[in-house]
Image (cartoon, rainbow, N blue to C red):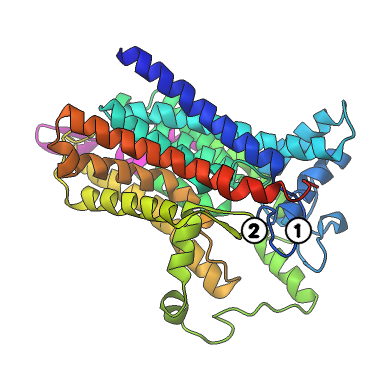
Amino acid sequence: MKWSREKSLTVVYFALYLMATLTIALHQPLNDTYPLLQNPPDEHSRYKVPLYICEHGTLPTGYEEELFSGECRWTYGFYTLLPYMTQGYAMRFAALFTDSELALLYTARLVNVIQGLIMAYVILLLGKRLFEDDRVKWLFCFLVTFLPQSLFMHTYVNPDSMCLLSTALMFYGLVAGMQDGFSFRPCVLLTAGIILCALSYYNGYGFILGSMVLFVACFIRKEGGKLRYDWKPFLKKGIIISAAVLLCIGWHFVRNYMLYDGDFIGLTSKENLIRSYGISRDTYYSEGKSLFSMLFGTTFFLKVALSFIANYGSTTLYAWKIVYLFYLGVFALGIGGAFFGRSTGQEPWREKTWLRLFFHAAMTLCIVIPFILLVRYAYATDYQAQGRYLMPGLIPFLYYVARGLEKLPLWRKGGERRKNILWLCSMAGIAASLLIMVYVVALPRYLEVTVL
């Protein structure tokens, strides 16, 4: 019976993901659609990068005229290029069989759909390691994969999809290493995650920092009532991981250094290009307004919260109010339970106090740093109160939500019947929220316009 339920849920899990992502990827428009912009955020500008790679077979610089979009005087060629490389070379392969512009666009989007599918599989494996109760495991998997905004990231041309996959790989590698020791497989997964993150999205670098903190802590040992550090395995594995990461990501930063006069990251060169056109962007900082006025004198937090849950199109398509109320309620209960609920004693590292402390410190970094970067960007560069910038911290945040729900008295003290009812209601709420956003809110709007 247990095996049958597990198999059925697995089929539903992947089928729902593919159904929802393919619906969005194949129907949302690429270009601006006035008066309601239904195209994904900046996709028309981002898509020019893989299209350039497809047509030329080489990587662009940030100064390529082909990458400019209208009056926008900068390009995505200054940013990390690995996500666009995977899409561009997939498009180049597809171009061997068709010259359809629509087919090339679909190819680029489907690369991200596949990355999201791999992430969904990694999340399923991660859930098995994190939670003993299968119901909580599935609740965690559904929360991560089917949060409408999380799923949206895998349906259009962007670097966020690869970044989300990279955080899943890093998280899984760390948890596997904490439980089984850092053998070959956890080290490979952790290394792959760091590489993908470093080459996909600068906002995700906080997860790399958190991973490094936790990796270092995993070699603390307690023997005879005293703590000691296993330097030999730490150096052996740490050096190998570091060397592999530097070898795989070094080309990007060396290339930037050579192209942009020593600018390793490339973003300073982007800003210099904008200023060279005499363009100045009004921000709270440039206008002399305080950070406090931006955070608490506007609807900043509300916009971030809503767009973290569900906000499609160019931040124009919102879900029903009940969807936001459902998720805000789940988040509030989960975080409340994580802080104040009684422990179930099921955390895999519960007996290792020092490791548990480092785990929570590392996960806090992974959650907080994207928020700090979002606030800094909104205040000093370009006011965009968008929850999608918080996605690098999604998995640890929803881990705490799921763990907190498990620690609530309503769950912990309930019998099996009550637990099953609560679990089924929660899973149904997550699935219904996604279906409402995709098929009731977004799809009817998309069908009003052509894809190209």
- 14 lies above or below 77: above
Residue ID at (76%, 58%):
32
- Residue shown at 55% from the left, 80% from the top: 284
Q: Is residue 281 magenta?
A: no
Q: Does 134 sit left or right of 226 as displayed?
A: right
Q: Nearer the viewer, residue 211 or 143?
A: 143
Camera-nearest residue between 239 and 87: 87
Q: Which mark is residue 314?
A: 2
Q: Amino acid at mark 1?
A: Asp
Q: Are marks 1 and 2 in contact (CB under 8 Å)?
A: yes
**Residue plotted at (75% across, 55% down):** 45
The answer to whether 228 appears left or right of 252 in the picture is left
* Element under disc 2: loop
Q: CA distance from mark 1 to mark 2?
A: 9 Å
- Residue pictured at 65% horizontal, 47% vertical: 444
Q: Residues within 10 Å of mark 2 (few under 14, many from 20)?
A: some
The residue positioned farthest toward the right in the image shown: 99
- Place residue 58 in its image quadrant: top right
Residue 225 inside the magenta-drawn segment:
yes
Out of 169 and 436, give the one closest to the viewer.
436
Whether residue 365 is visible to the viewer of this picture, yes or no, is: no
- Magenta residues (range): 214-242
Question: As shown in the figure, which amino acid type bears the numbered disc 2?
Answer: Ser
The location of residue 424, given as percent across then percent down, is: 32, 33
Residue at image mark 1: 32
Looking at the rendered image, the quarter that the N terminus falls into is: top left
Residue 98 visible in the shown view:
yes
Identify whether 129 is placed above or below 79.
Answer: above
Residue 231 falls in which quadrant of the image?
top left
